[in-house]
């Protein structure tokens, strides 16, 4: 398995997150972002115990090949 970093948030103050990765073995994307901890927001979602939710800014969509017309 090889993870490929597709891009980091250009507006991140510490240049660390959010980040978009692509797993070339599974064909899935991995998203690093801000954990949603607000109980009111989480209560509006049905989150199974084996999953979690992150917040991901719209400006990061540019790193998905399906959006930017590029390859991984």
Image: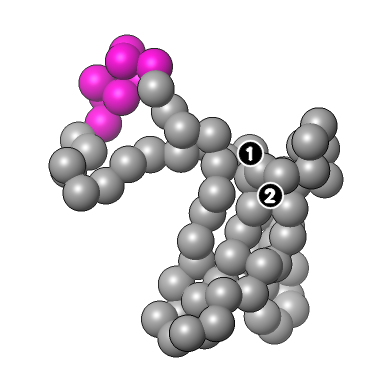
What residue is rendered at 57% in x and 75% in y? 3
Stretch of the chain drawn in magenta: 38-45
Q: Which residue position is annotated with label 2?
A: 60
Q: Is residue 25 magenta?
A: no
In space, the residues marked 2 and 1 are separated at their CA atoms by 6 Å
Q: Quadrant of residue 21?
A: bottom right
Query: Image height check: is 15 above or below 21?
Result: above
Task: Determine whether label 2 and label 1 are within 8 Å by CB.
Answer: yes
What residue is rendered at 49% in x and 61% in y? 30
**Residue nearer the viewer, 57 or 18:** 18
SS of the residue under disc 2: helix
One can see residue 28 in this view: yes
**Residue nearer the viewer, 50 or 56:** 50
Query: Image height check: is 5 above or below 56?
Result: below
Query: Image height check: is 55 above or below 21?
Result: above
Q: Quadrant of residue 58?
A: top right
Residue 33 at x, y = what percent?
A: 55, 42
Residue 42 at x, y = what percent?
A: 30, 24
Question: Which mark is drawn over residue 9?
Answer: none
Residue 20 at x, y = what percent?
A: 62, 59
What residue is rendered at 27% in x and 47% in y? 51
Furthest-top residue in view?
A: 40
Q: Quadrant of residue 41?
A: top left
SS of the residue under disc 1: loop
Mark 2 crowd level (few <14, some 14–19, many ≥20, 10 Å Cα)? some
Report the side of 14 relative to 42 (left or right). Answer: right
Q: Which residue position is annotated with label 1?
A: 57
Residue 34 at x, y = what percent?
A: 54, 34
Q: Main secondary structure of the magenta part?
A: helix
């Amino acid at each position: 398995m090889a993870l490929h970093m597709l891009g980091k948030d250009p507006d991140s103050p510490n240049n660390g997150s959010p980040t978009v990765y692509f797993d070339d073995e599974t064909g899935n994307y991995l998203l690093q972002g801000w954990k949603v901890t607000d109980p009111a927001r989480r209560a509006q979602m049905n989150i199974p115990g084996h999953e979690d939710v992150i917040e991901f800014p719209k400006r990061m969509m540019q790193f998905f090949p399906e959006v930017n017309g590029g390859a991984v």
